[in-house]
Amino acid sequence: MRVLIVEDDPELAGLLRDGLREHRIDPTVATTFAAGQARAQAGDYDVIILDVRLPGGTGFDLCAQLRRNAVDTPVLMLTALDAVDERVRGLTAGADDYLTKPFAFRELVARLQALARRRALAVTPAILRVADLEMDVGARVVRRAGRPIALTAKEFALLELLLRHSGQVVDRSAITAHIWDDNHDPFANVLEVLVRRLRSKIDDGFEPKLIVTVRGAGYRIEGTAGKAGRALP
């Protein structure tokens, strides 16, 4: 993973750089607004760490400028503790996540990895297929045996996750982390309800059944890509 750090405090920038290297992450440091903009637009980074206060401008303005220039690299903003206005302003400017200072380094790494995973999913092929099930990710259209299927946002997110890991078990924790926020109750049965609703749309009235429950582990979608199934009469 390649990470651009835009931070003017040399001590914090050094700590970030050295800590990321220990986690086998390749960091690059920019210390001003102009340098951060130039590197972000010229380099191929997986995530950008962006501080709020920079020589030559603010992190908010830099983030907004990058978005206007079609730089879609995920941005993690570093904000002051309890600075709600800063967090809201950063997200409004186009940031994908934020972390308040001081922070635990392992949380920073986890957030960077999550942002990088989301970007990797976003740039993978837009048409996903298993058996006679087809998803056009960009158009947000799902069909089975040629029939259009209307899904809610969470149903679509779950099906996309399963399709991107076709033939593999996706564990419950990975699904809940992908679909719900940190306030989700892991002991609630909302995941089972969501899977049941998705099955009723994807599998009921069709053969073969595609969504498989792996007891004690999670769920899997299986079937030969492009292999014709059939709608039941």
Image (tube, helix red, strand yellow):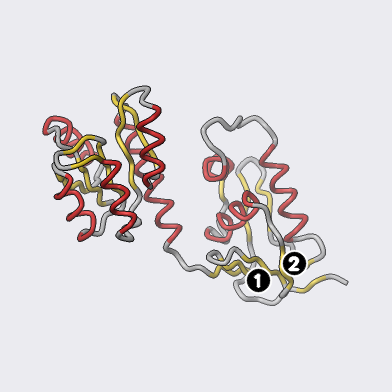
Quadrant containing the C terminus is: bottom right
Mark 1 residue element: loop
Whether label 1 touches label 2, CB < 8 Å = yes
Residue at horizontal 53%, vertical 65%? 138
Badge 2: residue crowd in 10 Å (few <14, some 14–19, many ≥20): some
Residue 121 position by quadrant = bottom left
- Vertical order, 173 against 147 (above or below): above
Amino acid type shown at disc 1: Ala
Q: Which residue is mark 1?
A: 131
Residue 109 position by quadrant = top left
Badge 1: residue crowd in 10 Å (few <14, some 14–19, many ≥20): many
**Residue 155 location (% of width, % of height):** 65, 52
How far apart are labels 1 and 2 at the CA level? 8 Å
Residue at horizontal 66%, vertical 68%? 133
- Comparing 175 with 33, the one in front is 33
Q: Which residue is mark 2?
A: 208
Mark 2 residue element: loop
Residue furthest to the left in view is 10
- Comparing 172 with 90, the one in front is 90
